[in-house]
Image: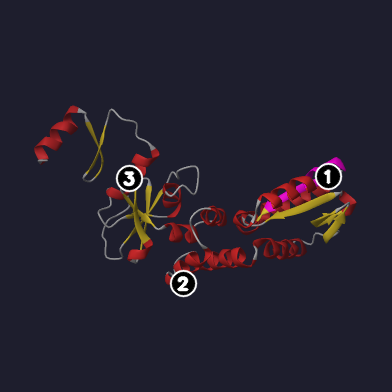
């Protein structure tokens, strides 16, 4: 299509310019998918959606991010447009896929570069832990690599046991006393208990490790605790890694409630 034809459509209001060389038909809703496509295409043919934008595109998170993360080669000269954030690095061909007509980071790279809950969601689907490790090692030195290694180790050895050790460390560092690990309550053993406050702390590991039997057992235990007037707080590996201050604050609040 000629430049004159494009300009006529823009002047008539039929097309709306979104970025350089990217136009949107104005009689259609500007959806999150359209917004992410425009952000990627507006930065050239080498641009790749990454971060939470890629996670949403792969179906790993329910909500599209307001800020679209993009990866561009180190030699690219494009500057970030409003609503986008650029990360400059050179990705290998194995770490880029085309999904629904858009270049995005692969499922495996997307999983290891996002938060623990995104990794867990990927492992519940098509991703394999060995694939995630290979992708992580292939991209060592990137921003967020140490955190990804911790999450991968937790997923491999069983995040529940690693998370329990982390809870004990957090409680000790916060100088919170009165707790007992692996405390028997009736027919069950709970992860942590504050007997004087009748408070139980339960830790949920990565969901991809869990089956129907685990789900039923957890619900039976929780129902028993509630019926016997125990307060129950549940935390995930993501809670402990991403917001430990909030975890400690909630525990303190629960202890203080009589």
Q: Are marks 3 and 2 in contact (CB under 8 Å)?
A: no
Q: How many marks?
A: 3
State the separation of the CA atoms marked 2 and 1.
44 Å
Region in magenta: 222-235
Residue at which label 2 appears: 137
Residue lying at 39% horizontally and 57% vertically, measured from the top left: 105
Tag nearer the camera, 3 or 1: 1
* Residue closest to the eye, 53 or 248: 53
The answer to whether residue 179 is visible is no
Residue lying at 53% horizontally and 53% vertically, measured from the top left: 118
Q: Is residue 233 magenta?
A: yes
Residue at which label 1 appears: 224
How far across and how far down the image is residue 54, in percent?
A: 42, 52
Residue lying at 49% horizontally and 58% vertically, measured from the top left: 127
Tag nearer the camera, 2 or 1: 1
Q: Which mark is residue 37?
A: 3
Q: Which mark is residue 180?
A: none
């Amino acid at each position: 299509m000629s430049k004159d034809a494009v300009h006529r459509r823009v002047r008539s209001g039929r097309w709306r310019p979104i970025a350089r060389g990217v136009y949107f038909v104005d009689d259609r809703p500007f959806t999150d998918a359209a917004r992410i496509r425009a952000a990627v295409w507006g930065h050239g043919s080498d641009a790749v959606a990454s971060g939470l934008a890629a996670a949403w595109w792969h179906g790993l998170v329910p909500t599209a991010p307001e800020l679209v993360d993009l990866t561009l080669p180190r030699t690219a000269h494009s500057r970030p447009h409003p609503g986008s954030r650029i990360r400059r690095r050179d990705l290998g061909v194995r770490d880029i896929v085309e999904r629904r007509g858009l270049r995005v980071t692969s499922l495996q790279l997307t999983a290891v570069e996002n938060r623990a809950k995104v990794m867990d969601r990927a492992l519940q689907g098509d991703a394999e832990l060995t694939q995630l490790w290979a992708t992580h090692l292939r991209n060592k030195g990137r921003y967020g690599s140490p955190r990804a290694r911790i999450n991968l180790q937790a997923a491999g050895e069983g995040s529940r046991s690693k998370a329990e050790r982390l809870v004990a460390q957090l409680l000790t560092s916060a100088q919170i006393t009165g707790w007992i690990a692996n405390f028997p309550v009736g027919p069950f053993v709970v992860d942590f208990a504050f007997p004087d406050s009748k408070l139980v702390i339960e830790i949920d590991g990565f969901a991809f490790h869990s089956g129907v039997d685990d789900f039923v057992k957890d619900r039976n235990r929780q129902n028993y605790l509630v019926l016997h007037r125990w307060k129950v707080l549940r935390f995930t590996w993501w809670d402990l890694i991403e917001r430990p201050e909030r975890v400690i604050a909630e525990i303190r609040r629960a202890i203080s409630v009589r």
